[in-house]
Amino acid sequence: GPTILLSHGWAGRSSQFHAFIGPLVAAGYRVVGFEIPGHGDSTGKRTNMLDVAHILSKVAEKEGPVEAIIGHSFGAGTTLLAIDKYQVKTNKVVLISAFSNVSFIINMFKELFDLRSSTVDAMKNIAMQRFATTYETSWNWEEISPLVTIKSYHGDLLLIHDDKDHEVPIEEALTLHQSVPRAKTLITSGFGH
């Protein structure tokens, strides 16, 4: 059957989608998941959005054509980035607990490790220098944000977010929806992140 690709979140793994896999297979779909470096059963110790978007593009190329991609949290951002930067083709995208801007992720990291703004700025500059020519595509911090990358996707789009998500506030999904009003939204309650 048609292929559905799963893109998990930070500190996650593909098996977190277990509740979707059985029903999708029963409905005739072929479900493909992958683990990002340093997560689940994969090798590696570190990764970033551009690495994962590139990996997602290679998985889609190998396993495609891809009917739909389901991305959760970090996986939502990398799904949109793969579509935008690597021209991944799919008819449908489902984004669960998506963030709207990379600055949201950077600020979470800053708060988690109690970093100064000057330290974060230095880290961002070092990353820009270090990865300036690493990827097949150019990039900057703002243009890899979902608010930007979502605009290059023109297929069916569903945003799912829980009003009790304490990791990525629902306002992030509402901001994405404002930028792409054609997207359908499903607001849940009590499921969290």
Image (cartoon, rainbow, N blue to C red):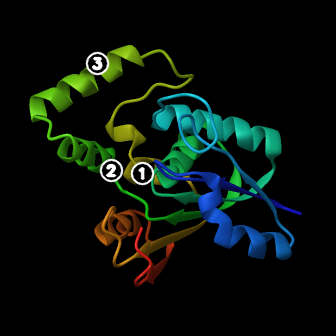
Disc sitting over residue 146 in the figure: 1
In terms of secondary structure, where does tag 2 sit?
loop
Disc sitting over residue 13 in the figure: none
Q: CA distance from mark 1 to mark 3?
A: 22 Å
**In this orientation, does residue 25 appear?**
yes
Residue on which the image places disc 2: 101
Q: Are marks 2 and 1 in contact (CB under 8 Å)?
A: yes
Residue in the foreground of this view, choosing between 127 and 42: 42
Q: Position of residue 120 (x, y in %)?
A: 19, 31
- Circle 2: residue type: Asn
158 to 141, vertically: above or below: below
Q: CA distance from mark 2 to mark 1?
A: 6 Å
Q: Position of residue 89 (x, y in %)?
A: 70, 49
Q: Earlier in the sequence, mark 2 or mark 1?
A: 2
Name of the residue lying farthest toward the front? 41
- Circle 3: residue type: Ile
In terms of secondary structure, where does tag 3 sit?
helix
Q: Position of residue 79 (x, y in %)?
A: 56, 49
Toward which corner of the image does residue 73 lie, by quadrant?
bottom left
Disc sitting over residue 126 in the figure: 3
Residue in view at x 42 percent, y 67 percent: 193
Toward which corner of the image does residue 71 lie, by quadrant?
bottom right
In terms of secondary structure, where does tag 1 sit?
helix
Name of the residue lying farthest toward the bottom? 189
Residue in view at x 46 percent, y 50 percent: 74
